[in-house]
Image: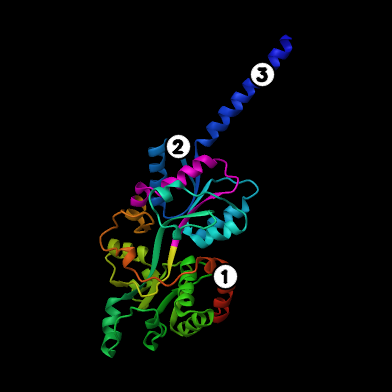
Amino acid sequence: MKRVVFLVLLSLLAGYVFSAGEQEVEEKVIIYAALDEKTTNELAAAFTSETGIPAEVALQIEQAGTVSGRIKTESSNPRADVFIGGNSNYHADLAAGGYLEKYSSPVIEKEGIDKKFMDPDGYWTGWYLGALCLLYNEKRYKEEVAPKGIAPPSTWNDLLNPVYKGEVIASNPATTGGAYLMLCAQIFRLGSEEAGFDYIRKLHPNVAQYTKGANGSIPLVSQGEAIVGFAWGHDTLKQKKQGNLPIVVVFPEDTGYEIGAASIIKDAPHRESAKKFIDFLLSRTAGEINAKNGYRYPVRKGVQMPEGVPAFESLDLAPWDLIKAAKNVEAWKKRWAEITGK
């Protein structure tokens, strides 16, 4: 009888220890981030300050494709809980491959956040927005283009003008999501794949260089190595202000845009903490950190943007098809490469 009682007590104690250990494991979140270091670290610190849950940044690199690849490689033994940053196409690709877990934050309903910025299937959460811009070197434009009676570049079609032959800095959709979204913008604004790729075909002779990063045009155009280029508006405005760069920034009609997303990795070791972190990303605190450091637009309203950043509502966006953009990534990148030889 004593032996039976002892075994029962031992079993109960083991259950308590396991339960306590399980609870302890949940009180942490491990982050993989495709964001700048300052924003990532401030988000992690603010989350811990507000919730008391430790946040560990295990990977921080601005190339979302690298983060996505890491998640796929580790899928049999996930080492992180959340993937934050990078446009929604990367997260949609992970979801399609079975690498993510569903989670729809109650903050979306509570704060009245527009659901068009969310995955309808619930695998990723949009928490910030960014739009593509044109930028041109003011000095070179005034000296070389204006005397010909040509207005400053302000539309996507302006980049096709022969005056810019060899003077456009573009980026490569094989290496950066921003370039892929630029390609999508042409397809969607012009109404068909054929029209979009015809635009790329006409643009190609004017391109001096295809950079690996979406913002490679910023230093090159600023230094006068080319007259015009395109990049992310938030990064361009931030660098222009911080470096007093001699460039003019224009958001063209029918511009491309990204939904910056976050998602929970399948079989994440700290799922409950991961959910709380997704909730936090939709908070005013997280929105203010992202706006201040990255000039990115939060999906929630009421967050003040840095001076000189136009309201997102004032931008003219290309008619967007999230599903089509996500489903055609590889096919459209392949066709782009065939046209450009890159």
Residue 340 on the magenta span: no
The residue depicted at 33 percent of the width and 78 percent of the height is 154
Rendered image coloring scheme: rainbow
Label 1, label 3: how far apart the Cα atoms are: 57 Å
The residue depicted at 56 percent of the width and 69 percent of the height is 329
Pointer 2 residue: 53
Task: State which quarter of the image contains the N terminus.
Answer: top right
Q: Is residue 94 above or below residue 179?
A: above
Horizontal and vertical percent position of residue 256: 42, 70
The residue depicted at 36 percent of the width and 51 percent of the height is 287
Inspect the image, locate mark 3, and give the three-letter code of the amino acid beneath it.
Answer: Leu
Pointer 1 residue: 328
Horizontal and vertical percent position of residue 40: 42, 50
Pointer 3 residue: 10
Q: Earlier in the sequence, mark 1 or mark 3?
A: 3
Name the residue at the bottom extreme.
148
Q: Earlier in the sequence, mark 1 or mark 2?
A: 2
Span of residues in magenta: 259-288
Horizontal and vertical percent position of residue 131: 39, 66
**Disc 3 on helix, strand or loop?**
helix
